[in-house]
Amino acid sequence: MENKKTTILAEGEKKKAAWLEKNGFDAEGYTYILIGLDTYAIKEELKEKGYKYNSFLRWHSPSPAGYEGNVYKMHWTEGFEASAWGDMYPIEGIQTKVDNLINEAKPKSPSEWVGEIGKRLHDIPVTLLSMHGFEGRFGYSNVLKFVDEDQNIYTWFTSTEIGIEVGESCFLSGSVKDHSEYKGEKTTILTRCRLT
């Protein structure tokens, strides 16, 4: 009986070790979670350097692979439990813990909210940062993102053609519809805008 138990435990250890290796942990059971970077912009580079992505740990690797200043070293026991048979289970709250680590490491946006909701802003010198569109229930809309000289961000949803390209500067007037925050960046949402 003791031999059978020892064999089962040994098989469980092998299964656990195989899972750890497959899922981006080193021989000592550590992985390096990437924090503080825009990983979407460098995802192909990350794949080339051996980083893996999963919903619990996000981008991580068994070595820092050139990102030593932007990783959190985590032992598997901080996020997972192993059964005697080598099955691995995530600990409740691991995804939230990793998301908090990532968000706390991100550089803080200098953007602040501008104006009062319902009030009109006039002739703010801005640069168009990005423009993309989507099909909604009222037809096609453009989402325009502007930045002013103080690095404050403004967003305008419109179905009209604006006549400027990304990177161009202009003066923006519009009514403050809302103050929102997305991924730590404060944004002033404008409506009924005019560009000059």
Image: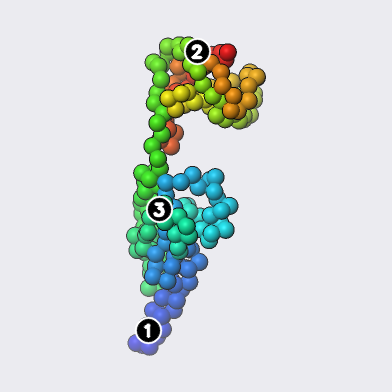
**Residue at (37% x, 59% y) in the render:** 73
Where on the picture, by quarter, is residue 164? top right
User: Percent position (x, y) of residue 190?
Assistant: 49, 19
Q: Secondary structure at mark 3?
A: helix
**Residue at (57% x, 15% y) in the render:** 195
Q: Amino acid at mark 3?
A: Gly
Label 2 neighbourhood size at 10 Å, few (<14), some (14-19), many (20+)?
A: few
**Residue at (50% x, 47% y) in the render:** 39
Do tag 3 and tag 2 residues touch (Cβ < 8 Å)? no
Vertical position of residue 131 compared to residue 40: above or below = above
Q: Earlier in the sequence, mark 1 or mark 3?
A: 1
Label 1 vs label 3, nearer the camera: 3
Instruction: Please state which of residues 187 and 9 is positioned toward the viewer in this rendering.
Output: 187
What residue is shown with label 2?
123
Label 1 neighbourhood size at 10 Å, few (<14), some (14-19), many (20+)?
A: few
What residue is shown with label 1?
6
Q: How many marks?
A: 3
- Residue 113 appears in the figure: yes
What residue is shown with label 3?
69
Q: Earlier in the sequence, mark 2 or mark 1?
A: 1
Q: Amino acid at mark 1?
A: Thr
Q: Secondary structure at mark 2?
A: strand
User: Percent position (x, y) of residue 49?
Assistant: 53, 59
Instruction: Please state which of residues 62 and 70 is positioned toward the viewer in this rendering.
Output: 70
Find the distance from the CA under tag 2 to the CA under tag 1.
77 Å
